[in-house]
Image (cartoon, helix red, strand yellow):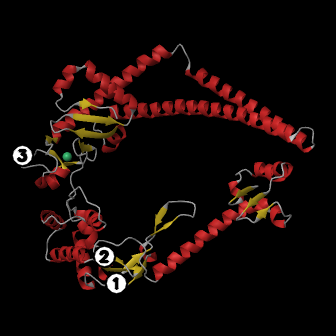
Amino acid sequence: MVVTKDLSRLGRNYVQSGLYIETYFPEHEVRFVAILDNIDTAYDTSNNDIAPFKSILNEMYAKDTSKKINSVLGTKRKLGEYLGTAPYGYKKDPKNKYHLIIDEEAANVVKLIYEKYLAGFGTMQIADYLSKQKIPIPSDYNKKTRGIKSLTYGLWQQSTVRFILSNEIYTGAIIQGKRKKVSFKSKKFINLPEEDWIKVENMHQAIISKEDFERAQKVIRATKGSRVVKNDYLFKGLLRCYDCKGYIGIRSPDKNGNIYGRCQRYGRFGKFQVCSPHNFNYQVFEEQMLGILIEVCKKYTNTKKLEEIAKQSKSKQSEELIIRKQIDSFKGTIEKEIGKLEVMYDDRLAGIITLDEYMKNASRIKEIVKKYEQDIEKLEQELSEKSNKTKNENKLDNLIEEFLQMKKPTKEIIREFIEKIEIHSNKQVDIYFNFKPLQEVNENFICAKKEYERKAVYYSSRTK
Ligand SMILES: [Zn+2]
């Protein structure tokens, strides 16, 4: 007797599971039961006959269940029942897991943040104040309340303060359904427009009055975008600190007109001993970096020309043709083997061969087919790698041509070439190119031209 939870557990392919249910099991006097589908071959019921349709129905059922769960969750949201984890300042009511109650310690911090903000302090000043007072950041605080000892002592970020200042939950309102799942099979979420959000007020005790919250929103809106737009530098956004992996900020010109780059994390948290300055003169850096980029591009073009002359004897096209022919012949073999299987199936139905013979031969043929399929897959991968390489090289060639013709290169084209540039504290610079060939040229280049390296203080290279 074979028992499975449902029909789908016996086999995904109905032709195969059908062979078991209708031929193999009856011939070997095996009783088959699929519990959830109500199939039992010991009894001749109509349920057994509709087995093929069951698998389709199963899927429809799964979809229906998902819809029902979604509508239950939607109702809960409309009633203002809180479904997520408790936000900072609140905890879940032990009597009702959909209800929030105040967490005194964290709620006091939330109140302090609003008080300071409304008294005219900026989000950075507030964040620094909290850090200095050694008040644990929300994620550390959560660990503490769950009994997990936090090894780190996190510093408050402006973004955390701003998030708390704009979270309406502190007024007692619950806002849910900001995003929804694409389908019951997918894990992807999409964001919904604000008018579709589900907002229910007065669901729990407020930490902040509605008036104070509104006042805070006005200040936030007023300060948004008030920062002066900085100059647009060629390498801006590509520069990273080698030590903390954070961004390197480029500062406005000083009174002598010099522009300096500096680790942003140091600039922001240096007073808490985070990272080190990584200071450097950006103008010198930009000039040298452009020079290096031009040299590398020229070097690449020259090397490529030489390679092409050397390669002209053997043709790349024929190599691909051989692979394609091989694939076609493998496909032909697979077709033949499957043809044999079909003939055997007919023979089996006509009683010419025994079931054991059929099973033995069928599994042998399946093995052969599988092997050829794997071979084809390997060859096809080889082919696509080859064509990808050619495509990438063509793209690079066009890019280099365009770049070398430009009098003043643009930010966009620099971005095409370079993934990122890491700055060490001793002013060493590591360039990470988006194209492997350029990376290779760059490395050989350093080995060959030591004196160039010495001239360019800011220069070195690393592979990804
Ligand atoms: Zn740093």
Residue 459 x, y percent position in the rendering: 22, 31
As helix, strand or loop, the secondary structure at mark 3 comes to: loop
SS at mark 2? strand
Q: Are marks 2 and 3 in contact (CB under 8 Å)?
A: no
- Does the residue at mark 1 contact the one at mark 2 (Cβ under 8 Å)? yes
Task: Identify the residue at image location x=30%, y=41%.
Answer: 420
Image mark for residue 204? 1
Q: What residue is at 51 percent from the left and 77 percent from the top?
A: 74
Whether residue 406 appears in this view of the structure is no
Residue 179 versus residue 58: which sits nearer the camera?
A: 58
Tell me the kind of residue under disc 3: Asn
**Residue 131 falls left or right of residue 197:** left
Q: Tell whether circle 3 marks a residue whose Cβ is less than 8 angstroms from ligand 1.
A: no
Identify the image quadrant of residue 58. bottom right
Closer mark to the observer between disc 2 and disc 3: 2
**Residue where numbered disc 3 is placed:** 256
Q: Is residue 103 left or right of residue 437?
A: left
Figure quadrant of the C terminus: top left
- Sort mark 1 into few (<14), some (14-19) or many (20+) by Cα contacts within 10 Å: some
Q: Which mark is residue 90?
A: 2
Dot 2 or dot 3: first in sequence order is 2
